[in-house]
Image (cartoon, grey):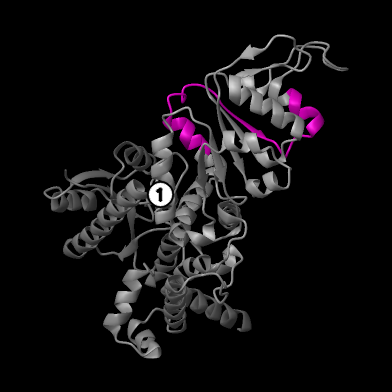
Amino acid sequence: MRSKILLVDDEELILRQMRFAFEAAYDVFTTSSEGEALATFERERPAVVTVDLSLKPTNPSDLGGLRLVEQFLTLEPNTRVIVITGNNDEANALKAVRAGAFDYYTKPIRLEELSVMIRRALRIYDIEKKLQQEQLGRSSTFQGMIGKSKRMQDVFRFVERVASSDISILIYGESGTGKEVVAQAIHQQSQRKEHPFIVVNCAAIPDSLLESELFGHEKGAFTGAHLLKRGKFELADGGTLFLDEIGELAPALQVKLLRFLQDRKIDRVGGTSPIELDVRIIAATNRDLEKDVCNRIFREDLYYRLKVVPIELPPLRERKDDIIPLAQHFIKQSCRDHRKPPKSLSSAAEGALLMSSWPGNVRELENLISRAVVLSTGPILTPTDLGLSSNQVSTDVNLKFAKKAMEIDFVTRALSRNRGIISRAARDLGISRVNLYELIERYNIRIQEFKLQSSDVSDKTQLNRQEVV
């Protein structure tokens, strides 16, 4: 299948020349209108776009091309956008690069040079697509679950095996590890997926209300019970009831839950007739229930009824391989939810994430990423945006990730000091240019970031001079 490219320019002659030059190799779409360009992009989803920054000859200051860059990348973050600009418009070209454009090309257009740039953009697009598909195949086995680490892959395979049965499951894990997400995945993989998935947090509802919430009540069962109420068990009939923080369940309710697990019947509060139900129970806890059993806090018979199939979720600090894929997933999700242009992690930010201890696990990572996406002003998230120090070293990180984070930190600092100039950065690090390029490729370090930093410093210096004058 041939790759699609979209060419956007206000000069019809240029469009005809580019179409003639490229249509033998690609499926080429051309337009000179901002509105038509967006419509064509939404319909065709091209891999590469070239767009002139100014699309109105009568008003060159109207940067319709820059607006299109942001809209294209919001719709398809993987698209490679090449901005075409006039000789004196480098500042606006850099704005486009900061907005996520792949590169910029200065007029007059030399078709051979532009062709090389398009081929390079397509190659990177194809490689990234392939890597994403491979990563997706490895890590996203279940809805909402991402994990390529061996620990999580073992969890996924285990969940896959038990999902089709109706057996009770007990999920162990620290707060924020994703126990509810696993329960949802089990439900979605089961034959009950067309029926309700009902969630009850046993720690969030007072004991005085929890019995009625779970089992329902008859009209007049107690003061204020003006109507019959169906409880969560009845609402989950045919589906799955997920009881989170099961270790907080009061002793009297433990007895009623045990009875249901034994004979599949419940009694509403104030009721006289047992109600037979078809509900699968999945429970979760961050407590040591075995210790609670020994201390007579939790019923031993209920514990063994629930623990027919136990699943233990590892904390994030024990699945470091998943941190960057999770962060990238949360960035895309947050950009979409908060209607922000696409953002990505700087290499230094990746290093800082790997070195954090994550006491709040996946939930802490998700909240941190969401905050950074909302508050950051640029397309690249830095350790500062994340509220992390690139120098912090967690005491529980293993040597593999400490080495990776340290190499990323050393390389990015050298590139920053030397404004992205490879030869100087390699000399600073005491390694060859070839070795530095290998490190840059291995850790997906974007040299453009450091060139942009250099441009920003130049702009500020020039501004200060103007103010002095």
Nearer to the camera, 225 or 257: 257
> At 11% from the left edge and 49% from the top edge, which residue is drawn?
24
> At 43% from the left edge and 83% from the top edge, which residue is drawn?
414
Nearer to the camera, 1 or 109: 1
- Residue 194 lies, in percent from the top left, at 47, 22
Q: The C terminus appears in which quarter of the rendering?
A: bottom right
From the image, tell me which residue sits under label 1.
154
> At 70% from the left edge and 32% from the top edge, which residue is drawn?
254
Q: Against 222, is 26 above or below?
A: below
- Residue 121 lies, in percent from the top left, at 27, 59
Numbered marks: total: 1
Observer able to see residue 343: no
- Residue 193 lies, in percent from the top left, at 46, 26
> With 118 as the anchor, is 450 left or right in this view?
right
Q: Against 464, is 19 above or below?
A: above
Q: Against 180, is 451 above or below?
A: below
Q: Residue furthest left?
A: 24
Whether residue 255 is in magenta: the answer is no
Task: Please identify the quarter of the rendering in which residue 140 is found.
Answer: top left
> With 299 as the anchor, is 410 left or right in this view?
left
> With 106 as the anchor, is 90 left or right in this view?
right
> At 47% from the left edge and 24% from the top edge, which residue is drawn?
192
Q: The N terminus appears in which quarter of the rendering?
A: top left
- Residue 297 lies, in percent from the top left, at 74, 42
Magenta stretch, residue numbers: 183-212
Nearer to the camera, 312 or 90: 312
Observer able to see residue 394: yes
Circle 1 Cα neighbour tier, 10 Å, few/some/many (<14 / 14–19 / ≥20): few
Whether residue 184 is in magenta: the answer is yes
Task: Please identify the quarter of the rendering in which residue 250 is found.
Answer: top right
Q: Which residue type carries mark 1?
A: Asp
> Element type at marker 1?
helix
